[in-house]
Amino acid sequence: MERVYIGLGSNLTEPAEQLRNAIKAMAQLPDTQLAAVSSFYISDSLLPGQPRYTNAVAALDSALAPLALLDGLQGIELDQGRERHERWGPRTLDLDILIFGERLIDEPRLKVPHYHMQARAFVLYPLAELAPDLQLADGRTLEQLLAACPFEGLERLPASL
C-alpha cells in the first residue's frame, strides 16, 4: 500500500455534493482505502467567467498501480457526468493524482508530483491539512511550496460538509 493524495474539484451541478459522492466512490476502489479528507474550500476559477470551484484533497492508501488508479479515478469522473471540452473548463468533477507515495512519474497520461500543484493554493492548503510535514519525491517540501503560494482567493468551508 502506498499513500496517494488526490485533488478534488468541481464547479458544476452542486459541487460540494459532487465531492462527497466522489469521496464515497474512491473509498470503493479495489485494493484502496480512504485514509482522510481535508476541509472543502471555495476558490476562483483559473479562467474568468466560470463559477467558483469547490476543492478538497483526499488521502488514499492504495495497492493499485498508478495508471490503474488513474483509470479508476477517471471512471468516477465519467460516472459523475464529466465531459472534457476545454482545458481548465467548467466540470462536474476533476480528480487529480497529486502525490503517489515516493514516486516520480513522467508518463504521457500521468505526471507526479502533479505538474502545477506548486502554484495552486486550492491544492496546497487542503493538502497541508492532511500532511503538513510532507516532502515530495523531487525533494521539495510542502512548507516551501506554501511559503511561495499565499492563501488568496480561498474560502474554507465549515466542517459540517
Image (tube, rainbow, N blue to C red):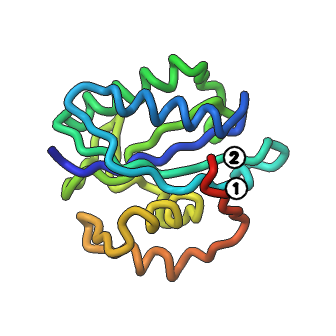
Is 19 situated left or right of 68 in this image? right
x 51%, y 19%: residue: 78
Residue with the most extreme front position: 160
Q: Which residue is mark 2?
A: 53
For disc 2, the neighbor class at 10 Å (few under 14, some 14 to 19, many from 20) is many
Q: Which residue is mark 1?
A: 43
Q: What amino acid does circle 1 point to?
A: Ser
Q: How far across and how far down the image is residue 152, in percent?
A: 69, 71
Q: How far across and how far down the image is residue 110, in percent?
A: 34, 40
Secondary structure found at label 1: strand
Secondary structure found at label 2: strand
Is 129 situated left or right of 3 in this image? right
For disc 1, the neighbor class at 10 Å (few under 14, some 14 to 19, many from 20) is many
Is 20 situated left or right of 71 in this image? right
Viewer-nearest residue: 27 or 108? 27
x 26%, y 32%: residue: 67
How far apart marks 1 and 2 lie (CA) works out to 5 Å
> Pointers 1 and 2 in contact (CB under 8 A)?
yes
Any mark on residue 115, and which? Answer: none
Dot 1 or dot 2, earlier in sequence: 1
x 49%, y 55%: residue: 38
Q: What amino acid does circle 2 point to?
A: Tyr
